[in-house]
Image (spheres, helix red, strand yellow):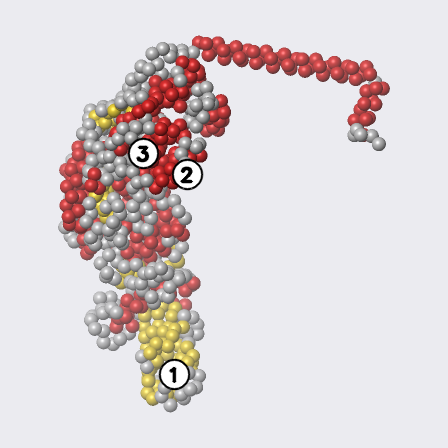
């Protein structure tokens, strides 16, 4: 039996029989192989030669005098005039050299664990890390990864420029190999720990230890060492004095985890350090203006150009900051926040101002005082996620106007149970139920969307959210620039309209700019121009081409409502802090249900100004609305702005011919009687009449709320057919009663007790009739919501009695009573 495949056996046999043919084939194959080999070898030698010539011509810095530090060139940040210096990165540089023996073992090991675990084992570079970084750069199509060792970072910090090029990277590799030959590992580590930037003007672990913990680098604890080692990757972002403490905690824990994995610490030390509560030292620095804004800008620069470029690149940064407005805002915030702490238990406040046409940030105040230790003043509340309360409502109403609803559309402000997990007659909020209150505890009955938004009434807002849909409402807010609401719409539900999600003041102010700019968005920016030390322009603001976000008339309609002082007078008074005689100022307040946040955002055609009040630790304030807590602060800054501005009004929205709209969209709710809007219109297309409204899951709940309100209203007699209403009704129904409504029983007839009986209706209205309710002797029996509009009962009482029916439909509400006897 053959051990070779049959085909192979045949080929061997063929070669034996035809030797010349086989030899010619082999000779040709060898010739081709020789050609390919020589060509490849020549290409390799040529390419290698070119690379070799390039390498030997590289201008490699000398390692002589290595210990002499290359002095970095300072980055300077200016206001919008370019004349007022807000911050000099190296204006008060902190740097103290110490020997390795005077740096704690934990600090040394923490830096090695997070930056370069193989530091004591490689020759200055790690080829595997280099290849990995190259692969990532090729994938990202940019030179972002370097695979740097501690040695490479030393070279980068001391001998090379901050440019990001392959040439500089190759120099870095070559110099790292050289440095490893002339210095010991401990010497290299010592230089690294003394030269590394740890945020702001702090360089080296000695200054970092003193600056953050008030200790020397030898005295810091294990947990403090982990914090220090966590900073160099992004010193401004991870700064314990900034807004990313949660991320800093995660990175500190990562450092500890790496130390444990590499054997630098024991399991007990690891667990103990994770639980250790570390106190950071607070600092005052009079050399900085608009500090919250400056560090917002610095973080932007580091993210875009890298920490190294910001620290050493000598950048000149012209920002968008209006220094006069900023200084006034800081003074007003500080004064009012201190007053609010006494009056309302609201110790902090923040302000943001933006030009809606350009998106330029004109002012940003993140707390009542950057150096105020009592409130952790360095925390920038303008960038913090907080619930906006009713300040979120304009996004929902804008989506409603886009969908076809009008400012005159009527919804009923009545106590309503919205949760499908709860009976419709349970008018409270708990785990399963959702029946929100209005801020004043009053329910107003039929209310237009204009009044509901202007007066910040909650129930109509929740109903508007339902009519629009939570998804489309959320999408509208995101379209206008709100990025923090990242969950699915089902996560937020209807409470989103009352501020059930978390947003930032900066993004809210920017989003309101879409209303101010007639539906167009110019993305927010803090930068006018950035130049490098050679004077080359790296970035420059050019008048943007705004993006269309909302239909112009939708934006103008929202502005028209929010600037309608007459519409909001019932809630705020005619001469409130929201009113500026002679100026069009649209404004919306917001207070969370638990009184943890008070908001106000207002705008003119040329300025958007937002303010927040509350407590950094999220504790509640006194139970006062934003109109009391934050509006006076905001009013003072807005008045300062208007004093410097020319008077300019919002264009009025276009008038629409409403004659063909469903009556409830025209404000004429009386033509259909006391019914929720779901009774009249198609929710998905409000310009169409409802066909079968009962199928809507909220229909019976909204109807119940309307009926329940009417029964307790002075107008109930007019609504339900009483001949002696307690007051003269303010609204009369336009109805044409039929000659007869009840067809059975007839007047004065006798019905036998215990006999099944059907009460019947004579429907002369046809499709206009929607519902008939039956009351026997004043007791509600039930209702019929379709032909033949009848109700079957078995009478159990005897004697004279009455049957009263209430019919509801597009004709309004009518009733009829007939007397008869049961025996």
Using the rendered view, name the quadrant where residue 58 is placed. Answer: top left
Instruction: State how far apart marks 1 and 2 are (Cα).
Output: 88 Å
Report the front residue among 273 and 519: 273
Query: Position of 117 compared to 249: left or right?
Result: right
**Residue 241 spot, x, y in % from top left:** 27, 35
Q: Which residue is mark 3?
A: 221
Report the front residue among 208 and 166: 208
Q: Earlier in the sequence, mark 2 or mark 3?
A: 3
- Residue at 36 percent across and 74 percent down: it is 773
Structural crowding at the residue carrying mark 2, measured as other residues with C-alpha within 10 Å and reported as few (<14), some (14–19) or many (≥20): few
**Residue 740 spot, x, y in % from top left:** 35, 78
Location of the C terminus (image quadrant): bottom left
- Residue at 15 percent across and 50 percent down: it is 343
Location of the N terminus (image quadrant): top right
Q: Earlier in the sequence, mark 1 or mark 2?
A: 2
Q: Which residue is mark 2?
A: 267
Check disc 2 and report its element: helix, strand or loop: helix
**Residue 11 spot, x, y in % from top left:** 80, 24
Q: Which residue is mark 1?
A: 745
Check disc 3 and report its element: helix, strand or loop: loop
Instruction: State how far apart marks 2 and 3 are (Cα).
Output: 16 Å
Report the front residue among 707 and 228: 228
| Label tally | 3
- Residue at 39 percent across and 38 percent down: it is 270
């Amino acid at each position: 039996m053959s051990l070779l495949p049959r085909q192979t056996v045949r080929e061997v046999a063929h070669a034996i029989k035809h030797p010349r043919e086989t030899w010619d084939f082999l000779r040709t194959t060898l010739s081709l192989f020789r050609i390919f080999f020589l060509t490849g070898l020549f290409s390799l030698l040529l390419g290698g030669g070119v690379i070799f010539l390039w390498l030997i011509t590289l201008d490699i810095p000398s390692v002589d005098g290595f210990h002499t530090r290359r002095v970095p060139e300072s980055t300077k940040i200016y206001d919008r005039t370019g004349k007022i210096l807000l911050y000099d990165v190296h204006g008060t540089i902190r740097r103290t050299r110490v020997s390795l023996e005077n740096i704690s073992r934990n600090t040394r090991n923490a830096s090695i664990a997070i930056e370069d675990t193989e530091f004591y084992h490689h020759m200055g570079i790690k080829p595997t890390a280099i290849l990995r970084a190259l692969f990532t750069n090729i994938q990202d199509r940019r030179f972002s990864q370097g695979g740097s060792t501690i040695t490479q970072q030393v070279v980068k910090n001391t001998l090379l420029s901050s440019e990001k090029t392959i040439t500089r990277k190759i120099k870095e590799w070559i110099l790292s190999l050289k440095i490893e030959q002339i210095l010991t590992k401990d010497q290299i580590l010592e230089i690294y720990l003394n030269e590394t930037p740890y945020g702001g003007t702090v360089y080296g672990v000695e200054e970092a230890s003193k600056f953050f913990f008030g200790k020397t680098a030898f005295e810091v604890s294990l947990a403090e060492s982990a914090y220090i080692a966590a900073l160099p990757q992004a010193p401004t972002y991870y700064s314990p004095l900034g807004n990313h403490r949660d991320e800093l905690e995660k990175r500190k824990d990562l450092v500890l985890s790496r130390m444990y994995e590499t054997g630098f610490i024991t399991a007990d030390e690891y667990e103990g350090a994770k639980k250790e509560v570390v106190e950071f030292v607070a600092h005052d620095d009079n050399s900085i203006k608009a500090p919250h804004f400056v560090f917002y800008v610095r973080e932007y620069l580091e993210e875009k150009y890298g920490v190294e470029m910001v620290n050493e690149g000598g950048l000149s940064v012209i920002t968008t900051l209006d220094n006069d407005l900023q200084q006034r805002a800081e003074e007003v915030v500080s004064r009012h926040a201190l007053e609010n702490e006494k009056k309302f238990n609201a110790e902090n406040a923040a302000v943001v101002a933006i030009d809606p046409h350009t998106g330029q940030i004109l002012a940003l105040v993140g707390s009542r005082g950057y150096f105020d230790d009592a409130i952790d003043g360095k925390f920038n509340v303008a960038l913090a996620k907080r619930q906006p309360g009713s300040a979120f409502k304009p996004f929902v109403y804008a989506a409603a106007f886009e969908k076809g609803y009008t400012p005159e559309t009527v919804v009923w402000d009545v106590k309503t149970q919205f949760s499908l997990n709860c009976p419709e007659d349970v008018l409270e909020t708990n785990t399963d139920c959702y029946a929100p209150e209005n801020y004043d505890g009053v329910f107003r009955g039929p209310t237009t969307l204009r009044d509901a938004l202007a007066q910040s009434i909650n129930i109509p807002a929740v109903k508007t959210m339902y009519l629009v849909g939570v998804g489309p409402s959320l999408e509208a807010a995101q379209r206008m620039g709100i990025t923090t609401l990242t969950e699915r719409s089902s996560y937020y539900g209807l409470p989103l309209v009352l501020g059930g999600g978390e947003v930032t003041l900066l993004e809210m102010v920017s989003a309101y700019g879409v209303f101010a700019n007639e539906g167009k968005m110019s993305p927010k920016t803090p930068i006018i121009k950035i130049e490098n030390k050679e004077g080359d322009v790296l970035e420059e603001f050019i008048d943007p081409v705004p993006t269309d976000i909302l239909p112009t008339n939708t934006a103008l309609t929202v502005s028209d409502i929010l600037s309608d002082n007459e519409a909001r007078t019932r809630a705020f008074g005619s001469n409130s802090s929201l009113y500026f005689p002679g100026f069009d100022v649209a404004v919306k307040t917001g207070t969370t249900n638990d009184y943890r946040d008070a908001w106000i955002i207002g705008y003119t055609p040329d300025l958007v100004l937002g303010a927040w009040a509350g407590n950094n630790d999220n504790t509640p304030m006194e139970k006062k609305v934003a109109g009391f807590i934050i509006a006076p602060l905001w009013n003072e800054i807005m008045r300062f702005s208007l004093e410097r501005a020319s008077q300019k009004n919002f264009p009025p929205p276009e008038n629409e011919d409403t004659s063909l709209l469903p009556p409830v969209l025209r404000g004429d709710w009386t033509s259909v009687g006391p019914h929720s809007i779901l009774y009249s219109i198609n929710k998905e297309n409000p310009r169409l009449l409802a066909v079968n409204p009962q199928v809507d899951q909220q229909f019976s709940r909204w109807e119940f709320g309307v009926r329940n309100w009417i029964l307790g209203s002075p107008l109930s007699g007019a609504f339900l057919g009483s001949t002696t209403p307690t007051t003269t009704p303010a609204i009369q129904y336009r109805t044409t009663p039929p000659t007869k409504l009840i067809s059975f029983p007839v007047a004065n007839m006798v019905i036998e007790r215990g006999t099944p009986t059907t009460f019947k209706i004579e429907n002369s209205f046809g499709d206009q009739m929607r519902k008939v309710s039956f009351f026997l002797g004043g007791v509600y029996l039930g209702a019929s919501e379709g032909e033949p509009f009848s109700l079957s009962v078995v009478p159990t009482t005897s004697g004279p009695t009455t049957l009263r029916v209430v019919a509801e439909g597009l004709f309004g509400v009518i009733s009829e009573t007939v007397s008869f006897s049961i025996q």
